[in-house]
Image (cartoon, rainbow, N blue to C red):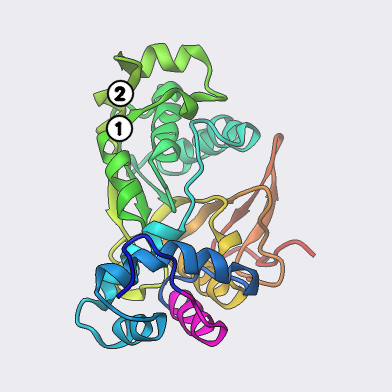
Amino acid sequence: MFKNDEVIYLPEEVFRLIRDLIRDYCGIYFDDGSRHLLEKRLSRRVHNHHLNSFRDYFRYLLYDRNSEEELTSIVDILTVNETYFFREKNQLKTFSEELLPDLLETKKDKKRLRIWSAGCSTGEEPYTIAMLILENGFFHDWYIEILGSDINQRVLHVARSGVYRKNSFRTTEQFFIDKYFIEQNGLFRIADNVKQYVNFNLLNLLDPYKVKLVGKMDVIFCRNVLIYFDLLSRKKVVGTFSERLAEGGYLLLGHAESLMNISTAFTLKHFQYDMLYQKPKKKGILTDVEN
């Protein structure tokens, strides 16, 4: 029997089987150069289940009644969740100064705004969105709902707690820290007037049944998430976003991401500080993305 901290050999063919299983489960793809990463990080899971090899572990992932729970644990172990408040400032400036006034006008009859932060990690992004809405000052009598979702249970626990260390504020102006956080023993707790707008849910973006429960959204943030997916998974997720977005709604991707060769369901719209994807209204003509 192996020692609990011993790295177990992961054969190439078994690596590909496990790699493809993870991709089919959540869209995250590990290339051939990632074998040693999976070998090192998942050996402890083989130990924990008292298995003798990664081949036995693959059978466990296929057939055990707790296989989905185990796949969730794998995602927690393998995903890196690097984020911070007010990330990609030009895009947030576009959201704050151009999108919010537009939504204020187009949705003034219903006074209801729903925003989804897909792949929210430890929660900095949805809380940033809430702070920007509060700073706008014109949504105080609206129904505001910001959904933060992630497939990683560990980061959602941090997000729900709303307590952060200094490294989450690397680009945050002191004004926002003073106004929306309470410092306690070197940690910073998000204020309740921000937290009230944000809900967090465990969600696999490739699960079509659970994603439908999200309902219609006016804006979807999915920044620096698609880069971890293979092409087929990207197409599926972007198709899901198109279904979940209301007509005229906006999709905000990371600056390193594009819908080129992925989808023609969105129009690339130019703003003063950035370019964003918009789901056209049915009466519109353009449904093309960048060429």
Q: Which residues are magenta?
A: 9-24
Most extreme residue toward the left is 65
Q: Is residue 93 above or below residue 151?
A: above
Assign the N terminus to one quadrant of the image.
bottom left
Q: Identify the residue position indicated by label 2 in the image.
A: 189
Most extreme residue toward the right is 291
Give coordinates of residue 226: x percent, y percent: 57, 61
**Label pair 2/1, CB-CB below 8 angstroms:** yes
Magenta-colored stretch includes residue 11 = yes
**Residue at 44%, 53% in the rendered image:** 119
Give coordinates of residue 196: x percent, y percent: 24, 33
Q: Is residue 176 above or below residue 242?
A: above
Q: Identify the residue position indicated by label 1 in the image.
A: 162
Q: Nearer the viewer, residue 20 or 45?
A: 45
Q: Which amino acid, by three-letter code, is at mark 2?
A: Arg
Q: Quadrant of residue 33?
A: bottom right
Magenta-colored stretch includes residue 243 = no
The mark found on residue 91 in the picture is: none
Q: What kind of element bears circle 2?
A: strand
Assign the C terminus to one quadrant of the image.
bottom right
Give coordinates of residue 83: x percent, y percent: 50, 40
Q: Residues within 10 Å of mark 2 (few under 14, many from 20)?
A: some
Give coordinates of residue 101: x percent, y percent: 52, 33
Q: Nearer the viewer, residue 83 or 94?
A: 83
In the rendered structure, the answer to whether residue 108 lies left or right of residue 15 reads: left
**Residue at 38%, 81% in the rendered image:** 53
Q: CA distance from mark 2 to mark 1?
A: 6 Å
Using the rendered image of the protein, determine whether residue 151 is visible from the camera's viewpoint.
Answer: no
